[in-house]
Amino acid sequence: MVSDKDNFIYPRGRYYGQVKPENLVFNSNLQEFAQKVSYICNLETAGKIPPENAYEQVKELWQSLKRSKKELGIGEEPFSNSDQ
């Protein structure tokens, strides 16, 4: 069960794309990526972490998102169904 505090701290947008399990998982990963990048940017802007550290953290998150995209087969569509 998700609390009101979790909804406030980790907001989730509604998904409007083609509903397939891999798309839903990737959308969730993408929203999490965006939220974490936002936190890192805010910490760096406030002087709480150095720019190099922020860059490395964002780079790691990006690599993780790319790996997720590849593992889920997003954009490959080997069995594309043109009826949808």
Image: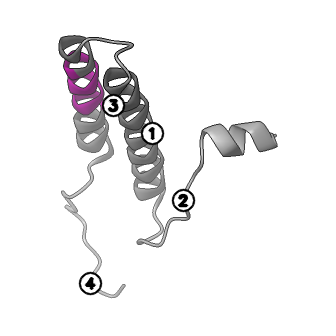
- Range of magenta residues: 55-64
Residue placed under numbered mark 1 in the picture: 35
Label 2 vs 3, first from the N-terminus: 2
Residue placed under numbered mark 3 in the picture: 41
Residue at 31 percent across and 37 percent down: it is: 68
User: For the residue marked with disc 2, what is the amino acid?
Assistant: Gly
**What is the secondary structure assignment of the residue under circle 3?**
helix
**What is the secondary structure assignment of the residue under circle 4?**
loop
Please state the horizontal and vertical placement of residue 83, each as a whole percent of the image. Answer: 33, 88
Residue at 21 percent across and 17 percent down: it is: 51
Considering depth in this image, is 3 or 48 the residue closer to the camera? 48
Magenta part, dominant SS: helix
User: For the residue marked with disc 3, what is the amino acid?
Assistant: Cys
In this view, the mark in front (4 or 1): 1
Residue at 27 percent across and 43 percent down: it is: 69
Q: Residue furthest bottom?
A: 83
* Color scheme of the displayed model: one colour
Considering depth in this image, is 9 or 77 the residue closer to the camera? 9
> Is 6 rendered above or below residue 44?
below
